[in-house]
Image (cartoon, rainbow, N blue to C red):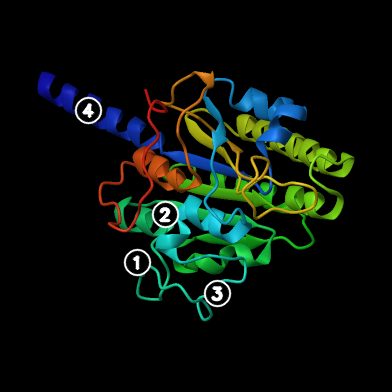
């Protein structure tokens, strides 16, 4: 009888553990520079990452443009490995052959690793810059949503619905917006319009987090804030510090509560951090990113 009781307790324990599915939400703001992070008010971002780790000295990969950097975030590699060297890259039209590729010709992404190594994982990719998905194999993504004309509110709502639907499953949510970058190109980095775009993004993040808390989806969820590059005047792509220094932040279970701290970091390290969170053991041999020291407890 005593053994039976212990067995029942064990089953209940395992069941409760299953409810604590691993959730990771990546918040991506295009063109969000360290200069902007320091100068613009963003109380909701501050509150979200106050119990985590923040770097303001993370380096983009070169060139400091959009598609190479977001590809690096999601593939643990630089352009010299994944072959995405410009925003014009497509699977059918590129010059640099990647070091590795899947059956369809795509460089292996974190989404591929999750689908192959994490049972029951659900993945989602929300974006509003059409070319962003070009370097990622869609077959490893459960929900893919593109919002037109720099819109992002619909995607934020879809992300909440997805998180709720699959709350008992491991999840990786990539939630991206390009409106900050477009404000920089249209009016200049650190212009009033750019500042307003960042403030609107912060407000949207605040509403998003509030809804997650009300739906009991906030606790035990990892959050990352990442970007691709900074900017100078109305452009980017060069090697100035305004372009080549960006914020990178993470919070969640097992993440050190140290606030702003300096450590060597690159955009190509993000996938390695995700691999650590999801306990992925088989890392693609072509990946060159590393797990930043001091982020995990």
Mark 1 or mark 4, which is nearer to you? Answer: 1
Please indicate, yes or no, whether residue 42 appears anywhere in the rendered image: no
User: Residue under circle 3?
Assistant: 90
The quarter of the image holding the C terminus is: top left
User: Residue under circle 1?
Assistant: 99
Q: Which mark is residue 10?
A: 4
In whole angstroms, how far apart are the C-alphas of marks 1 and 4? 46 Å
In whole angstroms, how far apart are the C-alphas of marks 3 and 4? 51 Å
**Are dots 2 and 1 in contact, CB under 8 Å?**
yes
Sequence order check, earlier mark of 4 and 2: 4
In whole angstroms, how far apart are the C-alphas of marks 4 and 2? 42 Å
Give the vertical position of 199 relative to 294 (above or below): below
Rendered residue at 26%/46% (across/down): 281
Q: Give the percent coordinates (x, y) of residue 251.
A: 51, 29
In whole angstroms, how far apart are the C-alphas of marks 3 and 1? 16 Å
Q: Give the percent coordinates (x, y) of residue 176.
A: 64, 50
In whole angstroms, how far apart are the C-alphas of marks 2 and 3? 17 Å
Rendered residue at 60%/62% (across/down): 132
User: Residue under circle 2?
Assistant: 77
């Amino acid at each position: 009888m005593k053994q039976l009781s212990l067995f029942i307790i064990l089953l209940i324990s395992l069941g409760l553990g299953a409810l604590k599915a691993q959730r990771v939400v990546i918040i991506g703001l295009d063109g969000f520079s360290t200069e902007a992070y320091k100068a613009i008010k963003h109380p909701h971002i501050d509150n979200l990452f106050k119990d985590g780790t923040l770097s303001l000295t993370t380096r983009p990969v070169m060139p400091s443009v959009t598609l190479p950097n977001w590809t690096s975030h999601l593939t643990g590699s630089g352009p010299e490995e994944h072959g995405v060297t410009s925003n014009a890259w497509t699977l059918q039209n590129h010059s640099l052959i990647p070091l590795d590729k899947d059956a369809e010709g795509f460089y292996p992404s974190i989404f591929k690793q999750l689908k192959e190594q994490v049972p029951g994982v659900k993945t989602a990719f929300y974006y509003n810059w059409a070319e962003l998905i070009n370097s990622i194999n869609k077959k490893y993504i459960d929900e893919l949503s593109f919002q037109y004309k720099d819109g992002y509110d619909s995607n934020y709502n879809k992300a909440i619905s997805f998180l709720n639907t699959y709350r008992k499953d491991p999840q990786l949510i990539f939630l991206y917006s390009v409106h900050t970058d477009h404000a920089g190109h249209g009016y200049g980095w650190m212009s009033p319009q750019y500042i307003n775009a960042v403030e609107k993004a912060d407000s949207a993040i605040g509403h998003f987090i509030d809804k997650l808390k009300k739906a009991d989806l906030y606790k035990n969820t990892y959050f990352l804030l990442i970007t691709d590059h900074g900017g100078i005047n109305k452009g980017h792509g060069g090697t100035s510090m305004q372009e080549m220094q960006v914020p990178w932040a993470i919070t969640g279970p097992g993440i050190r509560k140290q606030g702003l701290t300096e450590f060597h970091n690159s955009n190509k390290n993000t996938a390695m951090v995700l691999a650590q969170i999801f306990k992925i053991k088989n890392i693609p041999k072509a990946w060159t990113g590393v797990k930043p020291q001091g982020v995990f407890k």
